Image: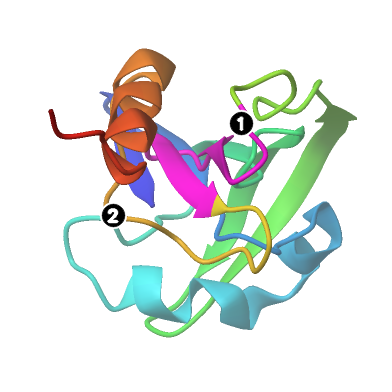
Amino acid sequence: MVQLDTEGFVSRNLIVHMPAGAVADDLRDPAIWRLVQGNRMHALRKLDHLLIFGADESWFATAIVSVAKADSAKLVITKVASFASASEGLFNDGTYKVVFEGIGYTIERVNDGAKMGHAHSSEALAVDAIRRLHPQRVS
């Protein structure tokens, strides 16, 4: 997920959320940007500044695009650091848990990791959705 933060005369600042499972070392492979470069609106340009987050925001990197082609982009990585995971301390009732995934808060079944429904904008909305997943007593 690539979002424009600011656009200047020469370069732009972009925020990037990497897909689940991606690690900072993946940024060294120019081919990972193939889909981004295929999208005219979000394609990286030379000198763009990137703030890149892992899917769970447990790490971030800053980088500058040094080469931008139609199917790839090379980055100069200026910093890589870790955050406390945004999923730490979120609601978990033993059956379902709330997980942060960059685009919002999703619900996973604990026993098999299956995603339940769509992303929610806050942890509270995801917790409400979990409550609706449990059977209700009808009187």
Q: Which residue is mark 2?
A: 117
Q: Is residue 48 at all visible to an observer of this figure?
A: no
Assess whether residue 73 is covered by the magenta stretch: no
Percent of width and height locating residue 44? 40, 57
Q: Secondary structure at mark 2?
A: loop
Residue range in magenta is 92-108
> How many labels sit on residues?
2
In this view, the residue in front, 20 or 45, is 20
Q: Identify the residue at horizontal 66%, vertical 30% (top origin).
A: 87
Q: Residue at x 65, y 75 (%)?
A: 30
Location of residue 112 (image quadrant): bottom right
Q: Secondary structure at mark 1?
A: loop
Q: Is residue 122 left or right of residue 15?
A: left
Task: Name the image colouring.
Answer: rainbow
Identified by mark 2, the residue type is Gly
Residue at (68% x, 62% y) in the render:
111
Label 2 Cα crowd, 10 Å radius (few <14 / some 14-19 / many 20+):
few
Label placed on residue 93: 1
Cα distance between the residues tagged 2 and 1: 17 Å
First in sequence: mark 2 vs mark 1: 1
Residue that extends furthest to the left in the rendered view of this protein: 139
Task: List x then y, in percent, for residue 83.
Answer: 80, 22
2 vs 1, front mark:
1
User: From this viewpoint, is residue 135 visible?
Assistant: yes
